[in-house]
């Protein structure tokens, strides 16, 4: 029996980047489907939290994400440009956001084509691996989409024409994450149970194995 889980994911989250490729590999190896549930990053969804929380949190994330990637042998660098236009010193969020809404709509459109997980993985690698600057320019995203079996021109056209519908679906993803009992990403939800963080992947797999998860070749 094929099992199903949902991965709540943000293109601005370094931990989402560190998790999505491993979940994609799990879905390829096991009789499992994982739906991509793209959500807006907290900086866009509720920027007031960034100004009321402990300022040490941001510094810790910078340190911890980098060392986590190093420990796993995953190429990593904070994106250039950041998917969210923000003054990292003051934490101020810019009024104009040319990247993150496009990325979220593209991710939702990719999922509606059944290739959300692959798209998120390929695009996250371009954004976060440090192999390119200006990931939003040239053919970087188009090539990432092609590796996921998608056409970026087609996705971008939908992201513009159906922006309101895609935004509504993204808002519904956030509501589903809230209903599952968590607020952060990456969170895998399996049978209503949330597994938050790139360090809970093994635990999520353990739970799914209890429910009958098997390799595809068995």
Image (spheres, grey):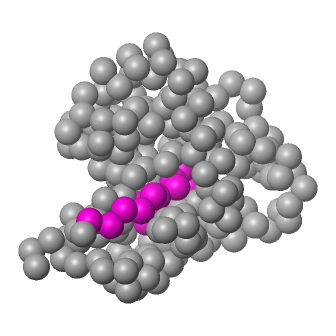
The range drawn in magenta is: 2-20
Q: Is residue 146 visible?
A: yes
Queried whether the magenta region covers residue 77, the answer comes back as no
Pick the front one: 88 or 18: 18
Classify residue 113 as left or right of residue 84: left
Quarter-wise, where is residue 74 in the image?
Answer: bottom left
Can you say which quadrant of the picture contains the N terminus? bottom left
From this view, report whether residue 92 is shown above or below residue 59: above
Q: Residue at x 10, y 79 (%)?
A: 218
From this view, report whether residue 13 is shown above or below residue 190: above
Q: Residue at x 45, y 77 (%)?
A: 204
Position of residue 106 measured from the top left corner of the image (x, y, whole percent) = 43, 33
From this view, report whether residue 140 is shown above or below residue 74: above
Quarter-wise, where is residue 193 in the image?
Answer: bottom right
Q: Residue at x 40, y 32 (%)?
A: 109
Classify residue 149 as left or right of residue 136: left
Position of residue 103 measured from the top left corner of the image (x, y, whole percent) = 48, 35
Pick the front one: 40 or 54: 40
């Amino acid at each position: 029996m094929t099992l199903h889980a949902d991965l709540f994911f943000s293109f601005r989250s370094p931990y989402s980047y560190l998790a999505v490729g491993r979940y994609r590999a799990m879905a390829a190896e096991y009789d499992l489907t994982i739906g991509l549930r793209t959500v807006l990053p907290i900086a866009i969804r509720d920027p007031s939290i960034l100004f009321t929380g402990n300022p040490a949190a941001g510094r810790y994330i910078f340190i911890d994400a980098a060392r986590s990637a190093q420990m796993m042998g995953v190429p990593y660098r904070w994106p250039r440009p950041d998917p969210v236009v923000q003054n990292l010193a003051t934490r101020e969020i810019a009024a104009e956001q040319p990247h993150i809404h496009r990325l979220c709509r593209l991710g939702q459109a990719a999922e509606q084509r059944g290739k959300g997980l692959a798209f998120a993985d390929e695009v996250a690698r371009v954004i976060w691996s440090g192999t390119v600057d200006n990931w939003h320019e040239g053919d970087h995203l188009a090539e990432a989409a092609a590796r996921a079996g998608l056409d970026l021109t087609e996705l971008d056209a939908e992201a513009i024409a159906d922006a309101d519908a895609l935004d509504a679906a993204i808002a519904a993803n956030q509501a589903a994450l809230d209903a599952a009992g968590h607020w952060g990403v990456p969170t895998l939800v399996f049978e209503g149970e949330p597994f938050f963080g790139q360090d809970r992947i093994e635990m999520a797999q353990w739970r799914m194995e209890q429910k009958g998860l098997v390799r595809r070749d068995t």
